[in-house]
Amino acid sequence: MRLTLPCAAVRLATRLLVAPALSPRLPTPVSRALVDLQGRLLPVPRGTRSTPSSLGGRPSVRVSVPGSRDDRPVLFLHGGGYVVGSPASHRSLGAWLAEATGGTVHLLDYRLAPEHPYPAALDDAERAYRALLDAGHPAQRIALAGDSAGGGLAVALLLRLRSAGLPLPAGVGLISPWLDLDLTDPAIARNTGRDAMLGPGLLEEGRRSYLRRGGAADPELRPLEADLSGLPPLHVVAGADEVLVGDADRLVERVRAAGGRVTYTRAEGMWHDHVLEAGLLGRAHTDLRELGAALRRDQADRRVRVAVVGAGFGGIGMGVALREDDLADVTILEKASQVGGVWRDNTYPGAACDVPSNLYSYSFAPGDWSRRFAPQPDILRYLRTVAADHDVERDIRLGTEVTDARWDEDAAVWRIRTSGGDLEAEALVAACGQLSRPAMPDLPGIERFPGPVFHSARWDSSVDLRGKRVAVVGTGASAIQFVPAIAPDADQVTVFQRSAPYVIPKLDRPYGPRAFSLRFRAWSRAARAFWTGFFEFGALGFTVVRPFAATFGLLHRLQLRLQVPDVELRERIAPDYPVGCKRVLISSDWFRALARPDVEVVTEKISEVTEEGVVAADGTLYPADVIIFGTGFRTQDFLAPMQVVGRGGRELSEEWREGARAHLGITVPGFPNLFLLYGPNTNVGSGSIVHMLECQIRYAREGIRRLATGTRSLEVRPDAATAYDTEMQSRLTDSVWTECVSWYRTDSGRVTNNWPGTMLEYRRRTSRLDEGEYVTT
């Protein structure tokens, strides 16, 4: 797993622990043992697998993470001054590189000096590369990478391969490459003392051991003096404070002068081989991620056209992920005039999130929040900021509504009709959400009412509620926020309760102006972990460990008793179903608002609406000047009104006539290259939907990566989708959500919205796209 430590702490640890292990004063076997031990202690991504292997007659370690593709190999040559280092010392770097490239990293255990001087290491590297070719890997699918001395080996290998007439790899990643074995660059003296890891002592010792003679006369050992034209794209990363930065500078300058393609990240304040600490240091992780993305682009077959429908949390997050990969030309289609999804539409007074900001945010963008439970303006500003900071804004077409999308089987593209014209895309990502279409009840006589009538998700801010008699229909998540906000201004608020909610206290608090200091951000990560555990506890209580849910019921009853002294009112607003069967709401103001003398709760059904107000089933007229619906959303119409037609003319809404279903909530048989975000059975009864969306985004991105690397169409197998759906419905049968009528279920009783497990389980199950579950062409 990835940790993020302050740069100063990592620098100090590098100086105190890593640099001494590289000292030439230590016996070589001791240095090797210490370096390998330190490498084993570095963190790796979840699901990392290291498998002993062999390449070209030399031992190697095959490192993969969930989603790694064997047909996109990366041959990695480790650093260590030619005298230390091994696959063990570089396992962490290899694993993070595998995650960044999406391929499998082969860590070669080449022979070391002084036992095996030049050209042993280079010979081993050549044999390993030839072995990948012999195994059937086309050169344009192979990437080559190396750090420090391994970077020098990688450049020397390129020159040898070119001289031998062998096909060159698709791209080359070089991390702090050591290229000048004469050690003549001025940066060595200038940065000695500033470099936290490396000094001239190890360089001189490595030079003597590797060459076993006074100079580097062989052209393979002088790559900076070679002809550097005709090489594949080079991607160079170096620290500005490292002793070898001059080697990287000169290489980049010479490649550019020769007309070659090269990218260069010269990281200010960073030391030699800082990317080794990718699991600990934020800058290292960023630099390695960008290096891996560049190599992935080099290995790609084509750029994929991707159409994303919706610019809320799902659409913006998908845009960020695809822009990071840079494998696709992305168009995000948004019907409204600005981004934000539900947080753009829901502007009612008191609108706020009921999940703490620490958890209701992207993992890669913590955000600046004014409160623990962010209000609507904070969240909308956050989404706009993320879109701007990650350059997603340029991909968004505002005011463009998608009317239908049809799969063209011959061309393997989606043909999409919009209000702004037609377009084509190899992949279609539907990020419409489950809570985007307001549900408007059909009340007899509503057309006769002369006053304003609107839904909370379409709040009419031009209506002044001061001194007005307001009828509120519904007591859902929106109503419990806006009723306390409008009650002090209105003359009278009449709440027509259709079903009493469970409501637990909202432990909200404001954040001060210094909240987002470094110390606070460290605390914020801890808070995110705490709230994850809290909501996972709730998820278990609604599914497999039902007694856990009793805690929420206890909190509800305690708050109700403390805030509502009227016994008769308490009885009227007490839920008559098991806790968790409907959404558990979070508020510390709702019960206080209902207890106000100018607020009345009506539990009778509405009979009709007249010119004077709302008439209940018992004949009582409740006068009203304004009617506001807090009646939720049409949650079963996942993609409506967009029409989606897949293979063989199959229409998705017809396929879902008996209830929506999708494999992992993301893919549907008969609809190739279609990915759903916040699809069927991915809502959480307890947790953060943003966490679930990030899981779906990673999964969909993996599918789009497949399309970029040669796959024409990707379609989930019917048997895999059926097996998954059967499992979901079986597990949901034992959940609390089957014990009442709610927006989680269809009229037939099928639970189509909720996920029956924990967030962590969903992350695990979507961590990789299993090609065995898909038909590809």
Image (tube, rainbow, N blue to C red):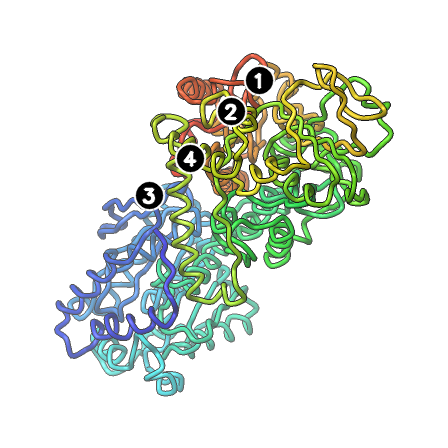
Foreground: disc 1 or disc 2: 2
Residue placed under numbered mark 4 in the picture: 762
Q: Between marks 1 and 4, how big is the CA–CA gap?
A: 23 Å
Mark found first going from the N terminus, 3 or 2? 3
The image quarter containing residue 225 is: bottom left
Q: Are marks 1 and 2 in contact (CB under 8 Å)?
A: no
Q: What element carries label 2?
A: loop
- Amino acid, disc 4: Tyr
Q: Distance between the residues labelled 1 and 3?
A: 37 Å
The image position of residue 776, as x and y in percent, is 50, 29
Q: Earlier in the sequence, mark 4 or mark 2?
A: 2
Q: Residue at x 58, y 51 (%)?
A: 323
Tag 3: amino acid = Gly
Distance Cα–Cα, label 4 vs label 2: 30 Å
Q: Please state which amino acid type lies under the numbered disc 2.
A: Pro
Return the disc, 1 or 4, that comes first in the chain's sequence.
1
**Where in the figure is residue 34, as x and y percent of width and height?**
18, 65
What residue does disc 2 label? 575
Given residues 149 and 754, the one toward you in this image is: 754
Q: Please tell me how many numbered marks the rendered image carries.
A: 4
